Image: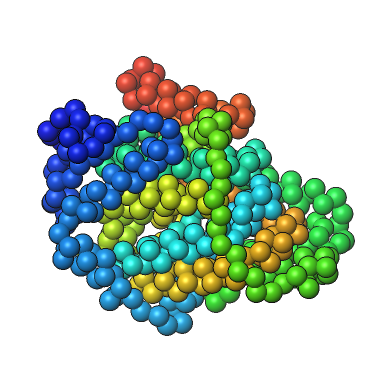
Amino acid sequence: MYFLQDCRGFDHRVAFPVIYCTPPESSAIDEYRFPVTICPIGFPDLCIDAIMMALSALRSIPGSTRNALMFSAWRDARLDRNEIAGSLGDLGTFLPLLVGMTSQNGLNFASALFFAGLFNVVTGLVYSIPMAVQPMKAIAAVALTEGLTTPQILAAGATVSFFVLILAVTGGIDWLNRWIPKSVVRGLQLALGLNLLMKGLQMVAGTKVWFAADGMMTGLISGVLVLVLFHSRRIPVALLLFMLGLSIAFATHPELLPGIGIDVTLPQWTVIAWSDFQTAFTKAALPQIPLTTLNSVVAVCALSADLFPGRSATPRSVAISVGLMNLISCWFGAMPMCHGAGGLAGQYRFGARTNGSILFLGIAKMFLAIFFGSSLMLLCAAFPLSVLGILLMFSGCELAIVTRDQVHRPEAFIMLLTAGACMGLNNIAVGFLIGLSVATCLRMGWFRVEDNSAS
């Protein structure tokens, strides 16, 4: 926890309050005292102010230390066939959710791909490990199952990043992870994963024909391919299905072929209304906040320490990274992004050992977005539902399967209750509050759910 010092009301140099924070940690960044400025105006102003909080911390570091932190990672980069193969390790999550939100919710494919690549490059310059940049799964799942608009998706990502950045700067991220039981977070993941799985199956069944290019038989064949190649390190099955979907799109929409070509596409400013933030908070941002703090900050740092001793990431730096990502990119139509333990594990499993894989992937994404972004957007709109449904179905399975660590009866009870309330009431926020309330009662000993009949 951070200690507030020198709370002065109004600084004579600025027109809003300044609080000086001295973190107790002894890391290279945390050794220096930095001001936290608070400017409670509108949400865009708060986003800018939150960004300034993080940047003020970096500006307070002497130039030599800051440069060493920035460029030491670049010297560790390596690029070979294993690093290139490893860069594809997270496409199983990235492609389905990106294509799904593009075709179903109207997300700008080019902007999302460009900023995903940009933050891959930035991440590769800051960290020497293959730190993944992936979609915020809870927001993506809610967007696909409840039909959120693009501004609502962007608002959800900005809201989550704003809270995560505040928690990072103030040190509250550790407190939040202690306060929210893991079983409640697992319940949210289970509900969101199952909803995504059912959405995928409904897409395949919604074609209502068996034998057609975009029919249920195509979905069945795609599902078999996923199962056969599930553990293949040579063939990224998500990339294979993506290419299959593009082939079917070309075959069923031949008018798209003449439109494919180089056409420079750059991100454009996106207007987000205050009502979008209000809708997004309860539907998508609230369930994503604990998932982000647990999986995108705490879990990914723990995994990085296991996989890369001596090169592990710190929770505070990762939280600042996640916060800055979406507070910058949401205004240009990019999908909500974060780091994640699953993405890091996937890229490591396929051969990535340095940040070279991330730098390669980021440059490739940015190139495709800038020069082929408009063409890819047209293709995503025509992407076959039978293939997209299978991709989303297995993404839902991956999201839900992490809940298997809740093996004890009290934790499993809370997880299932939270998931059931979220799905049964069709309200993630209410389900989260129900699970959190019952978990608190269990923790205080007001009732028990253990089976004592054996004794």
Q: Nearer the viewer, residue 48 or 216?
A: 48
Residue 447 is situated, as x and y percent measured from the top left of the image, at 39, 18
* Residue 241 seen in this snapshot: no
- 139 left or right of 436? right
Q: Nearer the viewer, residue 261 or 124?
A: 261
State which quadrant residue 73 falls in. Answer: bottom left
Residue shown at the point (48%, 56%) measured from the top left: 134
Q: Nearer the viewer, residue 282 or 295?
A: 282
Q: In what quadrant of the picture does the C terminus appear?
A: top left
State which quadrant residue 425 falls in. Answer: top right
Compared to 75, does 420 lie above or below?
above
Residue 57 is situated, as x and y percent measured from the top left of the image, at 22, 49
- 432 left or right of 1? right
Residue 329 is situated, as x and y percent measured from the top left of the image, at 47, 52
Residue furthest bottom in the image: 80
Residue furthest top in the image: 446
Q: How is the image coloured?
A: rainbow
Residue shown at the point (31%, 64%) measured from the top left: 126
Q: In what quadrant of the picture does the N terminus appear?
A: top left
Compared to 410, does 78 lie above or below?
below
